[in-house]
Amino acid sequence: MHDSLKDFKSVLEISLAWGEMDAAQHINNAVYLRYGETGRIAYLQKLGLDFDLKGKGVVLAEVNCKYKFPLTFPDKIWIGTRALLDTLDEFGFWTEQVIVSHRYQKISTVIRSKLVYYDFVNLKKTPLTQNNHDKVIRFEKT
Amino acid sequence: MHDSLKDFKSVLEISLAWGEMDAAQHINNAVYLRYGETGRIAYLQKLGLDFDLKGKGVVLAEVNCKYKFPLTFPDKIWIGTRALLDTLDEFGFWTEQVIVSHRYQKISTVIRSKLVYYDFVNLKKTPLTQNNHDKVIRFEKT
Amino acid sequence: MHDSLKDFKSVLEISLAWGEMDAAQHINNAVYLRYGETGRIAYLQKLGLDFDLKGKGVVLAEVNCKYKFPLTFPDKIWIGTRALLDTLDEFGFWTEQVIVSHRYQKISTVIRSKLVYYDFVNLKKTPLTQNNHDKVIRFEKT
Amino acid sequence: MHDSLKDFKSVLEISLAWGEMDAAQHINNAVYLRYGETGRIAYLQKLGLDFDLKGKGVVLAEVNCKYKFPLTFPDKIWIGTRALLDTLDEFGFWTEQVIVSHRYQKISTVIRSKLVYYDFVNLKKTPLTQNNHDKVIRFEKT
């Protein structure tokens, strides 16, 4: 695996689809957010964060995506996801993700996402809970 | 509006998006199914068919799509949707849809879809109900 | 692998993405066409069919999709693709595809697609060529 | 139109599609980037920026998306797009976009995008040209 992934405990492999390219013959910019979402869900499941669409779970409050070089089909990517512990607060945390091309063996995209714990019943943000807070720290530190 | 739409009581206009084109620089084949879905939902709402994701509603059991000429951005389409009354049975009916390009003033795609009434709680097909049956006939015949 | 795939020489594995589900909490109907496209491209590459977006290649003229049971995340699918040799004619052939869920070990969807050889420069269908014709038969028969 | 759009000379209306919602029953986060892309293309066409996929044109180098409240079907949005003139430099500029819900009459999302002029033949960034530079300023100032 690529060096840039060595600090990520959650790394997912995704095969690119031809139909994800747009008329510029690159993977369409919006599709990288799909990859990021897929990577974050794998991360949160691995971490064991409590998530229930009829109760509480994280939502995406902000995302920042830096496109370094464009992906093309055929290729596979590794997507590494980690929490940035210095951003962890009462309501959530930021994750950082790198998307690495197998073919080019370099970082295509860096995504930072602000995750906020949310109460799907009362439709407002809610504290992350001590349990989830601990899980994030334990996952990243061990 | 185009002549081929004159027998459709439900006609929706959709603007194509650049990002819906693929690397062949045409609207991607899967996207036509999205247009079809959007058109059928508009049709079913206009008709007033009872639909509740926590109760009963129609699901798509089969779809057939004939691609006559490829759409490209920029363009707008009209999508006409109608029930084929001779297919109406206890559990559902087929719809027929035509997608007409504004720019080329001709039919790009013809979609036929088999809709089946479904019980989302017990996860199985269920009779359409007399009320829905009557609504479909009334909508198409008046 | 599942029994229903035993007659398919091209079988691709795809991981479903959470974001491919729609508000009915199933993989969205249009997404199955994306899976089908991805499977057909893998098939055509394996077969070695001549394809050049600036020359000649196959296009999709018609697709039929039968939805047997809905896929949900998380799951993986196998998608088997084969040419139906009795449909092979001067301009193309139909493929048949089955989508099999790992989790449920049964067929979710059957897709039939009419592929037509197309001249991307002169924008019209064109004979498949003897070479491509032979490749399809050789691939399926050996 | 909504007050927050009064400083945008390019405002596009988009109808949301049911199928753009995900299993959380909101418009999927990645889809907002599609809306943003569609809005920027409308903006660049109105502006008259030189764009040729076989020559030079803008590409997206970075995007930041702040989700304020989630959109749901059925709804329409206005998407306003403008260049941030204080970011205009030799190679490009940032745009700012607001997505406003018709139904809720408030801002759902704010997107900032870094556009860089790019040479599609030599695959590297290239100066924006004086002509394009002037067009951006003229469009925003008059």
Image (cartoon, coloured by chain):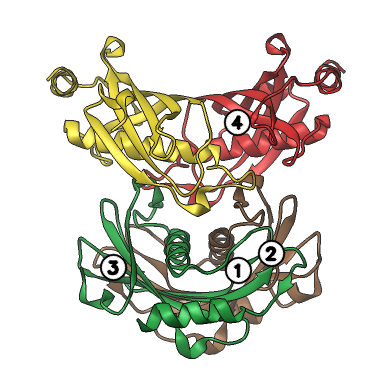
Chain colours: A green, B red, C yellow, D brown
Q: For the residue labelled by badge 2, is the local secondary structure a helix, a strand or a loop?
A: loop
Q: Locate the C terminus of chain B by quadrant.
A: top right
Q: Can I make out residue B67 in this image?
A: no
Q: Nearer the viewer, residue A133 or C107?
A: A133
Residue B98 picture quarter: top right
Task: Give the camera-side residue of B132 and B102.
Answer: B132
Q: CA distance from mark 2 to mark 4?
A: 30 Å
Viewer-proximal residue, B103 or A40?
A: A40
Say what amino acid the circle numbered 1 marks. Val
**Which residue is tagged 1?**
A59
Q: CA distance from mark 4 to mark 1?
A: 36 Å
Are labels 1 and 2 assigned to the same chain? no
Q: Pointer 2: what residue?
A: D70
Report the residue marked by disc 4: B99
Kindly identify the amino acid type of the residue bearing the numbered disc 4.
Ile
- What's the residue at 69%, 40% (across, down)? B13
Q: Chain of mark 3?
A: A
Instruction: Indicate whether A126 appears above or below B30.
Output: below
**Residue at 69% from the left image edge and 77% from the top image edge:** A126
Going 68% across and 11% down the picture, which residue do you hit?
B87
Q: Separation of disc 3 and disc 1 at Cα?
A: 25 Å
Q: Amino acid at mark 2?
A: Pro
